[in-house]
Amino acid sequence: MINFSKKIDELVDQIRERVSKEPMTPLERSKKVYTWDETLGHAFGGFAFWDPKCVGVTDVTAKEFYTNPEKMVYCLLVAAVKFKHDSLPIIADTYQIDVEACGTKLHYPEDSMPVIVEHAIQKKSDLAKLRIPNPKQDGRMPYFIEVTKLFVEKIGDIFYPAASTEAPFSGAVGLRGYENLVRDMREDPLFVHELLEYALTVQIEFTRAIYDAIGYPAGSADAWAAPPNISPKQLEEFALPYAARLLEAIKVYSGGKRGRWGLGWGYSLAPDQEHFLRMCNATGSGTCSLFEEEILGVAGYGKVNLARTKEICRQQKVVLSTNLLPQLIYSGPPETITERVTKLHDICGPGGGHMYYTTVPLNTPFEHVEAYVRALKNCRYPVQANAAA
């Protein structure tokens, strides 16, 4: 039987040896990103993955990845040793952990993240039957809290623990189902607000428990709220106020630390893009996540003015995270990955406050991931923009 505790310690030793030879730790570099300090050396970023095999791990199953804290952390550390990136997002099945604890039923297929098979709220009257789960004992909430604790225990002094849960609107989707919730927004908005109050309370309790464990706020992912899933007007009524209240609760509980609201898409679909961006940034989020669909204007999205987006984020002191297409990392070639990273650095790097993120799909050639990380480290600070948006 594999001793994963021992393997984790061996990986930690390798990571510490590598980081000790660098001018600063990834944690120090991340702090410079969030304080708009351009002395961070090279560009900062990392990637997430949803199956252990994405990073070459074959001795952990997908179900173990999503249920066993030690084995998930082991996978994160294997990736850190193999690819040497600066940011190790602590992300499981973000949109399901809390709603599963509330009563939504999941199935755990082989070689897949868990999938929802039955929402907790089949009838609107089911909402009254739900209780607020205890993050320390219900569902897989304790699993995720233990993942964050173990991460911090092992390398929290040299890496930022970028944990992620979900925002209230996306939680409401997980409890009620997307089609039902869209219908409810039109036919019974008061019920939707009642549901959102419940989802908000669940998330406040969960994020407080995570903060108690690691001393850092968790991010709040909210892709279900991104247009065109709902309209900008619906987002303003049903998603944004609850995300802002969650971020405020995090800020108060943590003594002033800012959380992150991860919308990701939809800025190009708003009637007034700049107003929409400023409104979303004004929630109190420390990060604005912009996926490459809107940087390139593909997959049905418009093309945002990237330089202007960065300037607005700079004005509002919100870090801009440019999130590369997973299809690019998967398909390559490495030269294209390098060119894309470099161009984003030229546009968004000046002035600091910029970082990178992507997802590594299953069966991605490792040389593509290596090209991505190598490009980040070749993009140096300070930088003068030499490309147009």
Image: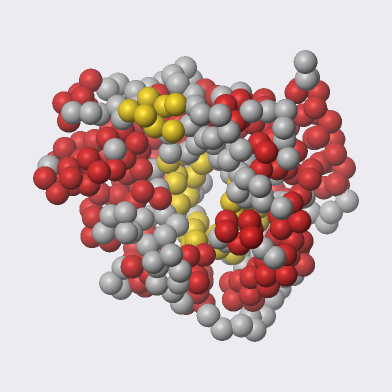
Q: Is residue 312 above or below residue 252?
A: below
In the foreground, 300 or 189: 300
**Horizontal side, residue 213 vs residue 21: left or right:** left
Spot the residue most to the left: 187
Q: Position of residue 132 (x, y in %)?
A: 33, 24
Residue at 64% x, 70% y is 340
Task: Tell me if 274 is positioned left or right of 350 in this view.
Answer: left
Report if residue 295 is visible in the image.
yes
Nearer the observer, 42 or 222: 222
Q: 98 left or right of 36?
A: left
Q: Quadrant of residue 11?
A: top right
Q: Residue at x 72, y 65 (%)?
A: 334
Q: Does residue 340 lie above or below 178 as drawn? A: below
- Expressed as whole percent of the image width and height from the top left, the position of residue 42 reads 74, 64
Any part of residue 275 in sight: no
Count up the numbered dots: 0
Q: Quadrant of the N terminus?
A: top right
The relative height of residue 372 versus residue 188 in the rendered view (above or below) is below
| Depth order, front residue of 114/261 | 114
The type of colouring in the image is: secondary structure
Task: Give residue 49's position: percent from left, percent from top.
Answer: 61, 44
**Percent position (x, y) of residue 322?**
55, 63
Q: Please name the residue shown 11% across and 45% down the image.
A: 187
Residue beneath the point at 40% across and 50% down: 223
Q: Quadrant of residue 169?
A: top left
Above/below status of 355 relative to 147: below
